[in-house]
Image (cartoon, rainbow, N blue to C red):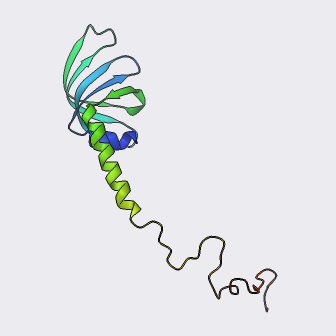
Protein backbone atom coordinates (compact mmCIF):
# COMPACT_ATOMS: atom_id res chain seq x y z
CA UNK A 1 0.00 0.00 0.00
CA UNK A 2 1.36 3.39 -0.92
CA UNK A 3 1.65 5.92 1.91
CA UNK A 4 0.36 8.82 -0.18
CA UNK A 5 -2.83 6.99 -1.12
CA UNK A 6 -3.32 6.26 2.56
CA UNK A 7 -2.77 9.92 3.47
CA UNK A 8 -5.17 11.09 0.79
CA UNK A 9 -7.83 8.78 2.21
CA UNK A 10 -7.12 10.08 5.72
CA UNK A 11 -8.19 13.64 4.98
CA UNK A 12 -10.47 15.10 7.68
CA UNK A 13 -9.62 12.15 9.95
CA UNK A 14 -7.75 12.38 13.26
CA UNK A 15 -4.08 11.43 13.30
CA UNK A 16 -0.98 11.59 15.44
CA UNK A 17 2.29 12.78 13.95
CA UNK A 18 5.63 12.29 15.67
CA UNK A 19 8.59 14.28 14.45
CA UNK A 20 12.23 13.19 14.42
CA UNK A 21 12.94 15.58 17.29
CA UNK A 22 10.35 13.86 19.51
CA UNK A 23 7.52 16.40 19.32
CA UNK A 24 4.03 15.05 18.69
CA UNK A 25 1.02 16.62 17.00
CA UNK A 26 -2.56 15.37 17.40
CA UNK A 27 -5.07 16.82 14.97
CA UNK A 28 -7.24 16.35 11.91
CA UNK A 29 -5.55 16.08 8.52
CA UNK A 30 -6.53 18.92 6.20
CA UNK A 31 -4.19 18.38 3.28
CA UNK A 32 -1.06 16.53 2.15
CA UNK A 33 1.16 16.76 -0.93
CA UNK A 34 3.56 14.47 -2.81
CA UNK A 35 6.41 15.31 -0.40
CA UNK A 36 4.25 14.24 2.59
CA UNK A 37 4.04 17.83 3.79
CA UNK A 38 0.84 17.93 5.81
CA UNK A 39 -1.52 20.51 7.27
CA UNK A 40 -3.40 19.70 10.48
CA UNK A 41 -6.26 21.58 12.15
CA UNK A 42 -7.38 21.58 15.81
CA UNK A 43 -3.89 20.51 16.87
CA UNK A 44 -2.50 19.58 20.27
CA UNK A 45 1.29 19.82 20.24
CA UNK A 46 3.44 18.08 22.85
CA UNK A 47 7.15 18.74 23.25
CA UNK A 48 9.71 15.93 23.32
CA UNK A 49 9.81 15.75 27.13
CA UNK A 50 5.98 15.65 27.29
CA UNK A 51 5.90 18.41 29.91
CA UNK A 52 4.50 21.21 27.70
CA UNK A 53 1.31 21.20 25.66
CA UNK A 54 0.10 23.74 23.13
CA UNK A 55 -3.22 24.07 21.37
CA UNK A 56 -3.00 25.33 17.79
CA UNK A 57 -5.79 26.17 15.39
CA UNK A 58 -3.77 24.91 12.42
CA UNK A 59 -0.18 23.87 11.68
CA UNK A 60 1.95 22.88 8.71
CA UNK A 61 4.49 20.06 9.04
CA UNK A 62 7.25 19.47 6.53
CA UNK A 63 7.34 15.84 5.38
CA UNK A 64 11.09 15.42 5.82
CA UNK A 65 10.76 16.03 9.60
CA UNK A 66 8.15 13.30 10.17
CA UNK A 67 9.22 10.17 12.01
CA UNK A 68 5.88 8.36 11.85
CA UNK A 69 2.13 8.87 11.48
CA UNK A 70 -0.60 7.08 13.37
CA UNK A 71 -4.00 6.86 11.69
CA UNK A 72 -7.24 5.06 12.62
CA UNK A 73 -7.12 1.28 12.04
CA UNK A 74 -10.39 1.14 10.10
CA UNK A 75 -8.91 3.48 7.49
CA UNK A 76 -6.40 0.80 6.48
CA UNK A 77 -9.23 -1.61 5.66
CA UNK A 78 -11.08 1.01 3.62
CA UNK A 79 -8.02 1.85 1.50
CA UNK A 80 -7.24 -1.85 0.92
CA UNK A 81 -10.78 -2.47 -0.33
CA UNK A 82 -10.62 0.55 -2.67
CA UNK A 83 -7.29 -0.62 -4.13
CA UNK A 84 -8.62 -4.16 -4.65
CA UNK A 85 -11.70 -2.80 -6.47
CA UNK A 86 -9.50 -0.62 -8.69
CA UNK A 87 -7.20 -3.58 -9.43
CA UNK A 88 -10.16 -5.80 -10.41
CA UNK A 89 -11.54 -3.07 -12.68
CA UNK A 90 -8.18 -2.80 -14.48
CA UNK A 91 -7.90 -6.56 -14.99
CA UNK A 92 -10.95 -6.70 -17.27
CA UNK A 93 -8.99 -5.73 -20.41
CA UNK A 94 -5.92 -7.90 -19.92
CA UNK A 95 -5.15 -11.02 -21.89
CA UNK A 96 -6.93 -10.03 -25.08
CA UNK A 97 -4.79 -10.24 -28.24
CA UNK A 98 -5.86 -7.78 -30.92
CA UNK A 99 -3.83 -7.81 -34.10
CA UNK A 100 -0.48 -8.04 -32.35
CA UNK A 101 0.92 -11.55 -32.64
CA UNK A 102 3.19 -11.39 -29.60
CA UNK A 103 6.76 -10.36 -29.15
CA UNK A 104 8.67 -12.83 -31.29
CA UNK A 105 6.37 -13.21 -34.25
CA UNK A 106 6.09 -10.64 -37.03
CA UNK A 107 2.68 -9.78 -38.43
CA UNK A 108 1.83 -11.86 -41.46
CA UNK A 109 2.85 -10.22 -44.69
CA UNK A 110 5.25 -7.78 -43.10
CA UNK A 111 8.41 -9.87 -43.44
CA UNK A 112 7.17 -13.05 -45.01
CA UNK A 113 4.68 -15.52 -43.65
CA UNK A 114 5.38 -17.72 -40.71
CA UNK A 115 7.73 -20.47 -41.73
CA UNK A 116 8.39 -18.89 -45.13
CA UNK A 117 11.39 -16.88 -46.29
CA UNK A 118 11.79 -13.50 -44.68
CA UNK A 119 13.14 -10.52 -46.58
CA UNK A 120 16.34 -9.06 -45.23
CA UNK A 121 16.01 -5.50 -44.02
CA UNK A 122 19.69 -4.94 -43.23
CA UNK A 123 22.05 -3.62 -45.84
CA UNK A 124 19.47 -1.71 -47.84
CA UNK A 125 20.74 1.78 -48.41
CA UNK A 126 19.75 4.47 -50.86
CA UNK A 127 18.63 3.37 -54.27
CA UNK A 128 17.80 -0.21 -53.30
Classify 128 as above or below 77: below
Left/right of residue 19 with respect to residue 31 in the rendered view:
right
Q: Position of residue 20 (x, y in %)?
A: 41, 21
Classify 77 as above or below 97: above
Left/right of residue 93 with respect to residue 75 in the rendered view:
right
> Closest to the observer: 34 or 68?
68
Looking at the image, which residue is at 40% across and 18% down? 21
Q: Position of residue 49 (x, y in %)?
A: 32, 8
Report the number of discs. Answer: 0
Looking at the image, which residue is at 30% across and 49% down? 82
> Closest to the observer: 119 or 64?
119
Looking at the image, which residue is at 72% across and 83% down? 115
* Residue 112 shows in the view: yes
Residue 93 quadrant: bottom left
Residue 69 quadrant: top left
Residue 128 quadrant: bottom right
Looking at the image, which residue is at 31% across and 35% down? 38
> Closest to the observer: 30 or 92?
92
Q: Position of residue 71 (x, y in %)?
A: 28, 31
* Residue 32 shows in the view: no
Q: Quadrant of the N terminus?
A: top left
Amino acid sequence: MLPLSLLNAAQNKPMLVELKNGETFNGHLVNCDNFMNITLREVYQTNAEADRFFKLKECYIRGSTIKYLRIPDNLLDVVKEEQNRAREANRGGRGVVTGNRGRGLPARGARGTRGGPARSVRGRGRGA
